[in-house]
Amino acid sequence: MVLEQFLGIVHVADTTTFSLKEAIIALINEHSLSLSSVHGQGYDGASNMKGEINCLKTLIMNETPSAYYIHCFAHQLQLTLVVISKKSKDCGWIFDTLGDLLNVVGVSCKRKDMLREKQAEIVVKALEDGEIESGKGLNQELGLGRSGDTRWGSHYKLILNVIALYPVICGVVDSIGNDARSDDDARKADHLCKKKDQDIVNAMSLVSLTKERLQDMRENGWESLIETTTSFCDKNGITIIDMDDVFVSPGTKNRGGLDTKNDHHFRIEVFLGVIDLQLQEINNKFNEASMELLNCMSSFSPLNNLSSFDKHKVLKLAEFYPNEFSNVELLSLDDQLDIYIADMRRNNRFCGLKDLGELSMKLVETEKHQVYQRFYLLIKLVLILPVATTSVERAFSSMKIVKNRLRNSMGD
């Protein structure tokens, strides 16, 4: 079992790479710890995207090669998708509009009730017209949950619900615009009317599948996107632009004399542009070394009578830690692994284990951690790597609570 201890909070005058590094080293030295003993790095979710943090990871690894950074692959993959989408000038406005939409439609229980009532009216009418069927589990009520930057799934779900509820939302926004209690609400409603969001093996699989899916979208996704968009516009009475016309930026009469066609702007600059940004950022964030490290770690899973065990991957993982495993110790580990896997698979006490934490505790309970000392050391090294999001994100959430209380105390 890994016992996590909170060392402290350090104030820094600035957040440059070198200042952050010096603050970390000072905190480590203050507790009589050694930087050379650091075997993992983890950072707050949103901070992962900052340039100074990326440089900090590299600086620390230059001094301590075993301080691997593979924090929350699935979590970071979602963060990458969200941040790059928002950074793109051609599609970032979508998220701003969704934010305004949530502020107007979901600001109170009354408006949420309006959304439900409109949705019920449309479902009843569709049932009467025979457009949809009734039955158990059909026509479930949808809502507009607020999305979070660290969860791409929440953004994706919000977008899907907005598409599904488009006629309902238009009706609610129109009602708010006609009966707004304040000028601010009326302006927001009018603005919206005019414009008419794990485990290791799965984490690696998500990264690879995302890259493959993005590449497939890049090569084959444009035509299907146009068909889907056209169908949606026809269904909801939205004017469809001519893709052969000259592109006019929203809010302007022309584009500085540039004869850029709508097709070129939306296909090359927006569609392909955003996909290329996503692919570039994913390749930067999930490098080959980290992927290989994760791949080796997957061999430690005790599920299904250790069916994922791969001796060569375990030895490869040991090579990532030259300070702990010399050439002689690697040879010793090689011999030890054959005995280990045979012992584990015939020992009933090791059946039904769900994760690496349970495996490590069972090894200690049966005192086999003394028999397979080198392998047990590898398990400990794997366990202390901040791969799972829960503990790291919980720590940063706690820090935010502490900082907020300190600010409130200073204000008082």
Image (cartoon, rainbow, N blue to C red):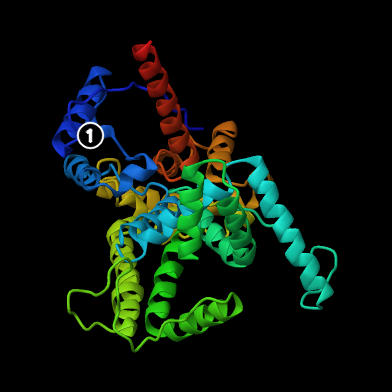
* Residue 250 seen in this snapshot: yes
Residue at point 43% right, 31% down? 395
Using the image, determine if residue 168 lies above or below residue 382: below
Rendered location of residue 390, percent (x, y): 50, 39
Mark 1 belongs to which amino acid? Ser
Circle 1 crowding by C-alpha within 10 Å: few under 14, some 14–19, many from 20:
some
Q: Which residue is mark 1?
A: 36
* Residue at the farthest bottom position: 244
What residue is rendered at 14% in x and 36% in y? 18
The kind of secondary structure element at disc 1 is helix
Q: Residue furthest top?
A: 412
Query: How many numbered callouts?
Result: 1
Residue, x 38% and y 83% (percent of image)? 219
Image coordinates for residue 306, horizontal then vertical, percent: 57, 55
Foreground of the two, 92 or 203: 92
Q: For this view, does 407 lie left or right of residue 55?
A: right
Q: Position of residue 174 (x, y in %)?
A: 58, 58
Residue 302 in sight from this viewpoint: no
Q: Position of residue 382 (x, y in %)?
A: 42, 44
Quadrant in which the C terminus is drawn: top left
Which residue is located at x 46 percent, y 50 percent? 187
